[in-house]
Amino acid sequence: MSGKEIRSPEAPQGIPTPSRTPANRKKLGMYFIESDDRRTALGGGYSTGGATPVNIRGKPISDLSKTGGWIAAFFIFGNEMAERMAYFGLSVNMVAFMFYVMHRPFTSSANAVNNFLGISQASSVLGGFLADAYLGRYWTIAIFTTIYLVGLIGITLCATMKGLVPNQDECDQLSLLLGSCEPAKPWQMTYLYTVLYVTGFGAAGIRPCVSSFGADQFDERDRNYKQHLDRFFNFFYLSVTVGAIVAFTAIVYIQIQHGWGSAFGSLAVAMGLSNVVFFVGTPLYRHRLPGGSPLTRVAQVLVAAFRKRNVPWDKSEFVGLYELPGKRSAVKGSSKIPHTDDFRCLDKAALQLKEDGMSPSPWRLCTVTQVEEVKILIKLLPVPACTIMLTLILVEFLTLSVQQAYTLNTHIGRLKLPVTCMPVFPGLSIFLLFSLYYSVFVPLSRRITGHPHGASQLQRVGIGLAVSIASVAWAGVFERYRRNYAIKHGYEASFLTAMPELSAYWLLIQYCLIGIAEVFCIVGLLEFLYEEAPDAMRSIGSAYAAVAGGLGCFAATILNSIVKGVTGGKEEEGRQSWLSQNVNTGRFDYLYWLLTLLSVVNFCGFVYAARRYQYRKKPGAETDLPAAKTELQAVAE
């Protein structure tokens, strides 16, 4: 028997082949072909069509024209905008709040916030699991956005009630720098960490569901579906950008002018208003049925495949692999998935044996669709894994470039921008890119790639990763120039003094490049994961992107610790850590070059994975994507 095919035993030569009867099964060649008379082991299946949209009560929608579409999507954009505003508002203000108000050391404050950001993203798989398994995306968003609001209210109370913060009397700037201010009591820090992680828990439930729920509002049978989906994910990320810009500008301004309580309170008010807007749109939303626990289905496939690992293919009493008859799917909320030849060891889970009996346990026999779900989840992993490097660079920029900006002139004419507003410029570059994306990039790239949308999803991810390399490489070049300039002009010890002749707006080049990289990489990744993930696991697929972001935050912390451990502690030799608090004596440029090298290696790994990846061919849908062999040829060249 060929290792490439699963075939029925052929009749010996000279023996006539019996005619096709109900006792005979259709042949399984290179891909699965279902048998109309196959016996059902896992119940009657779901015959309503896996991807059929339903209303909030779980009933099929009779008139789709009255629901979904762009109007419903805009209600969802508002929720995402407020969530991102709160997320970035906390990330840019919480370190300073812990340092100036709670009197925590700057390093431990930064680590605490980085851990909060990382955990809130990495735990997004929990929200995706609940949405796909039990609650559905709408109810998951509704529950966790309320939890998010409760956390923000708790943080606002911490910033406004004197009893929840240490005594601020006799704590001036010098006392803060010397660490002589009264520290926060353990119970005060416990309260702050509790409400902070409640907020992170709320974000973890929302993040994997919002983009998928928005994409659910478009009809897959519409001939313009792919065009709508492409534009939706671009506008979705635009709403993320608007939230970030407001956080880096308006929230920073409110904090400077009116204090911490007003800044955090404005985030809570914005989140509350977005919740109201989200619930107002409820009659317009289209829903997808949750498909039951995806972890259980994955475990069933692994257990069934392990049990039959030593069973030869030709021992099966039935031709081919097990699946429900007709168009029914054994997975609620999913259409059938055709068989593929990847990870052939998992196909043993669908190999039907005589000893399985008439009604076998799903822990012994799984359907082809169930097996293919596991295969897809495995095949998707390399792509989001390669985007971890982009998040790592973003995290480093948010911390290191702010330290660089303190040594530079941040004036625009007579206007002096606060250093904490510098991260707003990637958002502005994203606005510029979106204004040119459909009028310039798509027509130009369409001529090169022949792709109707200018570039496929993986090509866009690859473009983003390539641009991120240019961004961090430029950061290394400019930092080397800035450091040499500071030493040459006598600013070596004055790392908090701005050099009037050197503008901070040289940093805009790396900020704009990383903003462009975000658009291509993150938008392409979200669209890729939504389209390629199994129907009943799309929230889990979207969670892959959030988990990759969380791992990027952790990776930045780990990398910084390694760099400090390897390069620090040599002051007696006249050498300081690359990440010295004095940016003029440290070697941020070396770290940027290290990140450039790691990014190049990561990009090569991505190109290898992308060229091997084959897009899903959904039943009844025509694909307009290029062949896998030419998938990232344009990017690689």
Image (tube, rainbow, N blue to C red):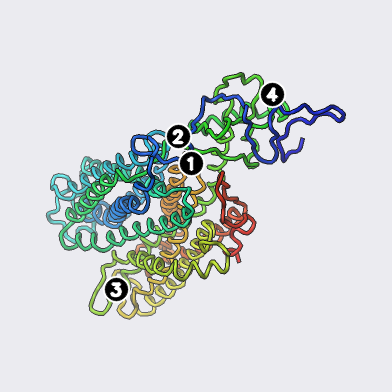
Q: Describe residue 273's horizontal placement relative to residue 362 as left or right.
A: left
Q: Quick one: SS at disc 3?
A: loop
Q: Nearer the N terminus, badge 2 or badge 4?
A: 4
Q: What's the CA distance linking mark 2 and mark 1? A: 9 Å
Determine which residue is flagged by label 4. Answer: 23
Q: Are marks 3 and 2 in contact (CB under 8 Å)?
A: no
The image quadrant that residue 134 belongs to is top left
Q: Are marks 4 and 1 in contact (CB under 8 Å)?
A: no
Task: Indicate the quadrant containing the N terminus: top left, top right, bottom left or bottom right.
Answer: top right
Q: Nearer the N terminus, badge 3 or badge 4?
A: 4
State which mark lies toward you, 2 or 4.
4
- 21 or 341: nearer the eye? 21
Determine which residue is flagged by label 3. Answer: 410
Q: Quick one: SS at disc 4?
A: loop
Label for residue 291?
A: 2
Position of residue 2 relative to residue 85, above or below, is above
